[in-house]
Structures are given as structure tokens and as C-alpha cells.
Amino acid sequence: MSILADIFSATILFMIPLLLVALGGMFSERSGVVNIALEGIMIIGALCSCLFLRFMDASGFGPAHPQWGMFFAILVAAFSGALFALLLAFASVNLKADQTIGGTALNMLAPAFAIVLTWAIQGQGQTTILIPTWARITQDTLGVAVKENFFQAFLFKSFYQTTIWAVFIFIIAAVVLYKTRFGLRLRACGEHPQAADSVGVNVYRMRYAGVFISGLLGGIGGLAYTLAAGSAFQSTVAGYGFLALAVMIFGNWKPLNILGASLFFALFKILGSYSGSIPFLPKFENIKASEYIYLMLPYVVTMIILVLTSKKSRAPKAEGIPYDKGRR
């Protein structure tokens, strides 16, 4: 029962950053801008929010008001990621630059910037930013009596405020995309921007909005990943931004499908991490470095799924094509 609770808790924990970042990529690509820079956005969001958490911890406000401290850190992660994403929006919309190259450049910039800034603040060679223990929701935080049962083992072993916000963000994203005028205009700009422009939709503004929302969610996803991965930020998110791109494609740019894909990929990642504790999984004891077989599992499954579903995936028609107002 304890192992099952650990697997279930960890799966949800690692599903959250995939879900948030993939939803962010969905908004950007639905507007017509390919956002390869999700990895870099996650790093910037995690960097700024972790530095903010350290500041809150040093000031004493965080330990005294842990949930307010986490709430403000989430806001910092969101807006730092959004500001970084605006670099891609400017290059893609205003300069009509190649979106793939622009995103790749931002992915290269982000970890280097994180290392330099961390060194400048903490001293040369200090590239790790420790996360305060009060950032996690515990029985003590909420004043709940400690009981040994499955529910509390799931809820309080690895539970952060980002999990709660991810639920609300998912619902809001689905409603906004399919039930509002903004969502209709955003999808129109990704499918046929000339037609959208002809009925008065500002394509440039909508594409900026899509990339900005992508940055908001990507920044929060960066903080969510850092909280899930351990007790410190180490200037990387271990390729989770690229994995979120695969989740988005596998989910066919639809919120509900992305939710299922996020859960699927997170489960395989956790099965790889807990493979030694699960009795019914084969151990491959005769194979050298067999512990890495299950650690490779989520990435191997990702490639297989993308190969099998790539023909059925339908990306927005105008995705990656710079909009020219004079072209019809």
C-alpha cells in the first residue's frame, strides 16, 4: 500500500509540470507560433521563483506565511516566464524570424543566464538554489492530525500549491479555448490568419497573447518541476520542456487529450524510478547497468508513441508561418 501511494503521489507530482507546459505550448501553437522555447521558459520561471523563495525565507515572511509565500512565488514564475517568452513573440511576430531557430536560441540562452545569475548572487561555482522546506504542503502547514492512511500518504508526502493551481488552470484553459470569443479568435489565427484579419481580428495581437500565455504556464511549470525533482534548482529542467512538446503533439493540441498524455508519460517516468521497489517487474539482473533500462522507459515510449501517432496528429495549418498582412 505504501509503494502504491508513493507511485500515485509521484505520478501526479510529475504530471503537473508536463500538463502546464504542454497547455502553454498549445496556446502558442494554436495562435500560429511554434514555441520550441518551452525548455528555456521553464528554466527562467524556475530560476526567478526559486530566488524569490530564498528571499522570502531570509526575510522570515515565508516560514510565517508559507502558502502566501508560495502563491507569490508562483506569480513570479508565471510573469518571469511570460517576459522571457515575449522575446520569442517579438522575433516571430515583429521580425518574422524563423520560429524554430528563435526558440532554439532562447533554449541555449536560458541555462547560461541561470548559471551566470546564480553565480553573481551566490558566488562563483554555486549553481544550486536550495528550496525552503515550507514550500511543501504538510499536515503541520494545514493543522491536520497525522494519520497513516493511503489518502494522507498521497496528499501530504509530495504535495505543492502548484498542484492545486494546475487543476484550475486546466479547467480555465479548456473553457477559454472552446467557449470564449478570445479562444475562437486565437484558433482562427492559427488556422487561417488572413480570414481572421478580414473580419477584424488583430492577428499580431492574438499571436502575442498566445505566446504570452505560453510563457505564463511554462514559467509555473518550471517551478512545479523543480519542486517535484528535489530540494534545489540546478539551472536545468532535464529536458522536460521538450517532453512537454511531445505530450502536446500526442495530445493533438487539445486540453483533455493533453491531460491524458501528461498522466501517461508521468506514470512511465515514475515506474522507471520505482522499478526496483515493484516486485512484479523483471529485474534484468544479468544485464550490466540494468537499472538504466527502466530510466530510459519514458523516453523510449515517447518516441514510439510519436511515431505511431504522428500521421493522425493535425497541427494548426498556419503554425510556424509568419503572418504577412499584405498576403492573401
Image (tube, helix red, strand yellow):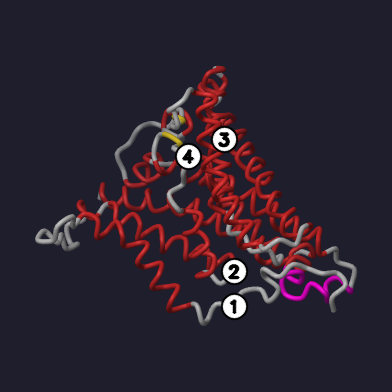
Q: In this rendering, which labeled residue sits more in front, label 3 or label 4?
A: 4
Count neighbours of disc 4 (C-alpha within 10 A) and say few if under 14, some if 14 to 19, many if 20 or more.
many
Distance between mark 4 and mark 1 Cα atoms: 34 Å
Q: Could you say which disc has been placed on residue 314 in the image?
A: 1
* Amino acid beneath label 2: Trp
Distance between mark 2 and mark 1 Cα atoms: 8 Å
Sequence-earlier tag: 4 or 1: 4
Range of the magenta residues? 187-198
* Amino acid beneath label 3: Ser
Count neighbours of disc 3 (C-alpha within 10 A) and say few if under 14, some if 14 to 19, many if 20 or more.
many
Sequence-earlier tag: 2 or 3: 3
In percent of width and height, residue 144 lies at: 43, 32
Q: Is residue 188 above or below residue 244?
A: below
Q: Could you say which disc has been placed on residue 253 in the image?
A: 2
* Amino acid beneath label 1: Arg
Sequence-earlier tag: 3 or 4: 3
